[in-house]
Amino acid sequence: MTSTEASAATRPKNAVVILLDSLNRHMLGAYGGREFATPNLDRLAARSVRFEKHFTGSLPCMPARHDILCGALDFLWKPWGSVELWEDAITRQLHHAGVTTQLISDHPHLFETGGENYHTDFTAWDYLRGHEGDPWKTRPDPSWVGSPKFFDRFMPYDNSRGWFRGEADFPGPRTMQAAATWLDENAGHHDRFFLFVDEFDPHEPFDTPEPYASMYDPDWQGPHPIWPPYIVGGVAKGVLTERQARQVRALYGGKLTMIDAWLGKVLDALDRQGLWDDTLVILCTDHGHYLGEKDVWGKPAAPIYEPLGHIPLMISTPGVAPGDCSALTTSVDIHATLTDLFGVTGEVRQRTHGRSLLPLLSGEAACVRDWLLTGVWGREVHLIDGKRKYACAPAGPNAPLEMYSNRWSTMPTHILTREQEMPYPDQRAQLDRMPGSAIPVIHQVWDASDPAPFWAARRFSGNHLYDLDEDPGEERNLAGTKAEADYRDQLRAALEELEAPAGQFVRLGLA
């Protein structure tokens, strides 16, 4: 038996991926956080390899899931979307390989326009209703008088919230309980399985029952502001008072601690079923969430600073001792790890951008990549090499803006019209090809005269360059120094390697 065959023979049979949305790395005990209690996340970290330099790829919610499930970095081509005609989610390859796959989620975007086709190739899927923008109920529960007005305009959550009477009724707890139940009922019944728990907490609304609602700010009086603003300079501009700012941050902490408690039920099921002996367990997120760092709140139009883009990743695998890994990694690497684990690497149709993390876990490699790209479509493109982060903004007008997609959609806001969220294709649209695909794709270009599609219509603050080792708070912008020229060259080379659209080079002044 060769060393490669021996390694494959001892690999885990199964994989469990638990994605907690908007999970702030710097607030977890395992990463040095002391502000909020996260005992079960810390419990998982104690038996895992904890990745120290893991960063976002495509942002926000659905683009990040595209990274993980399809392995293709897509923020350079489109803002938000489903599995394309030329792509397969990993579940399709796993189906052909005889792996049982299960999705358990309360994430509403998976079941809205723009989220199509991620769930369809799972062997089975379970959707727990009522979170955020999920149109679950047509009216509030009239018998429930404890539900305040949550927002300055109607949101679907206003109809749903009154139906949650206790902690176990909230979508996050129901999702984690469903995952624990699935493990108890299915462990040992399938030769190999992949369980994907896509849990929307601690994403807003930061709505929890007691004791979590008052856990970190017991002196607050009045209704809780469970919908945080999305703004740069929230306190400085008077959108939040200092007192309200403390409360919003405390409400995030309450939701973090609540979902941590229910994560414990999944870990208990892994214990009961002895699954740690043959199962790879990944804990990840799509991105963080600003809660006043640099007076930034939510996920507004701004460069991707550390609280949003530097994210946690923990992997527990049989036979690998817990510890830290300082290798540079990003979200598409999770897809590559899973295809490597299940032996379906060569069966992926689309061009992918990930690097398997199994060599890092086994000790066969000390690094798998020298750089990564991260960003939001139509915003800055960021290059990170593990030491420095370079955010390149448009050199002039934010144009041309290009979209390559056969599934025309963007994030449903429940506030804007469909046309405001994403203009429709017009006479400038043409057929083109995606890198790695021969299937025709609609290529739409917008110029500076067009109303910018959602996300891209906000101001920019120029280029940013930070030394993450010496300046982790990103206070000293090195853009404009001699060092920036080197990073512009590196970014241009990275975009060329990915065969990024030509418009990106023009938009960023790299042509």
Image: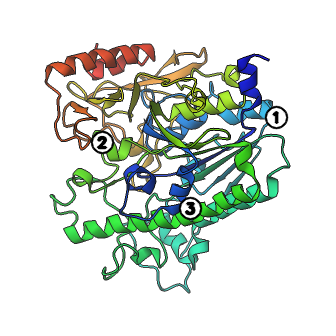
Q: Which mark is residue 305?
A: 2
> Left or right: 276 with respect to 312?
right
Q: Choose between 301 and 212: the one closer to the eye.
A: 212
Do the numbered discs 3 and 2 sit on residues whose CB atoms are within 8 Å?
no
> Left or right: 322 with respect to 188?
left
Q: Choose between 492 and 48: the one closer to the eye.
A: 48
Compared to 438, does 135 lie above or below? below
Q: Earlier in the sequence, mark 1 or mark 2?
A: 1
Label 2, secondary structure: give it.
loop
Do the numbered discs 3 and 1 sit on residues whose CB atoms are within 8 Å?
no
Q: Earlier in the sequence, mark 3 or mark 2?
A: 3
As measured in the structure, the alpha-carbon distance from the residue carrying label 1 to the one carrying label 2 is 41 Å
Compared to 492, does 448 lie above or below? below
Label 1, secondary structure: give it.
loop
- Residue 273 drawn at (x, y percent): 77, 55
Q: Nearer the viewer, mark 3 or mark 1?
A: 1
Q: Nearer the viewer, mark 3 or mark 2?
A: 2
- Residue 482 drawn at (x, y percent): 15, 19
Q: Which mark is residue 98?
A: 1
The residue lying at 16 percent from left, 37 percent from top is 476
Identify the amino acid type marked 2: Tyr
Identify the amino acid type marked 3: Pro
Q: Which of the 4 quarters of the picture holds residue 450? A: top left
The residue lying at 54 percent from left, 51 percent from top is 46
Assign the N terminus to one quadrant of the image.
top right
> Left or right: 342 with respect to 314?
right
Assign the C terminus to one quadrant of the image.
top left
- Residue 148 drawn at (x, y percent): 41, 79
Name the residue beneath numbered marker 3. Answer: 135
The residue lying at 25 percent from left, 27 percent from top is 394
